[in-house]
Image: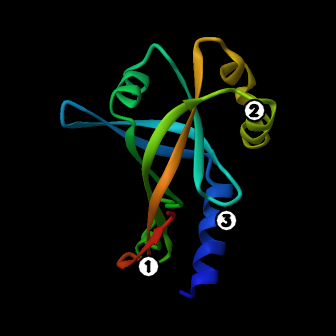
Amino acid sequence: MSESNLEKNLKALMKEQKLAVLATFHDGEPYTNLVAFVTSDDLKHIFFVTPVATRKYSYLTASRKASMMIDNRSNKESDFKDAMAVNAEGTVLEVEKTDELNSLYLEKHPYLKDFLNSPSSALMRMEVKRYIVASRFQNVVEIDMA
């Protein structure tokens, strides 16, 4: 896959998929959650919302390191040759809920407006260090975002 096709496919996957698996860490142990996400146009940032009274939030604020898996599998045999899975690795921080960021998030997830606007929810931003893209089951490419 050429670099331009890879970026095009990565952007399409990020736009089409609504949920990601977020992996956080605590005392050396992984912890995973589903999160509704959106990316910046340049793919350097991934945004999601979480209630502050959760393990997810406390683990993120303690270590700030996380990874996310986004994929397009359909649980069919064809996934072994057609599915694409992306692992995003980076650092996560809570950011201010600005009009611009709220609009970006709600454009993809309008049904989560109350969740986003709740004072007990935090808007989180992953600064993506790298993407690891797996396609055609064994074709793996790393994209450094630095």
Q: Earlier in the sequence, mark 2 or mark 1?
A: 2
Residue assigned mark 2: 102
Q: Residue at x 75, y 32 (%)?
A: 102
The tag on residue 12 is 3
* Residue reaching furthest to the front: 146
Query: Looking at the image, is 67 positioned above or below residue 62?
Result: below
**Alpha-carbon neighbours of circle 3 within 10 Å: few (<14), some, or many (≥20)?**
few
Q: Earlier in the sequence, mark 3 or mark 1?
A: 3
Mark 2: secondary structure: helix
Query: Looking at the image, is 5 positioned above or below residue 30?
Result: below
Q: CA distance from mark 3 to mark 1?
A: 16 Å
- Give the residue type at disc 1: Arg
* Residue reaching furthest to the bottom: 2
- Give the residue type at disc 2: Asn
Tags 3 and 1 touching, CB below 8 Å? no
Q: CA distance from mark 2 to mark 1?
A: 35 Å
Q: CA distance from mark 3 to mark 2?
A: 21 Å
Residue 36: x and y, percent? Answer: 59, 38
**Alpha-carbon neighbours of circle 1 within 10 Å: few (<14), some, or many (≥20)?**
some
Q: Is residue 4 left or right of residue 103?
A: left
Residue 99: x and y, percent? Answer: 81, 31
Closer to us: mark 3 or mark 1?
3
Q: Residue at x 59, y 19 (%)?
A: 121
Tags 2 and 1 touching, CB below 8 Å? no
Q: Residue at x 58, y 12 (%)?
A: 120
Residue assigned mark 1: 136
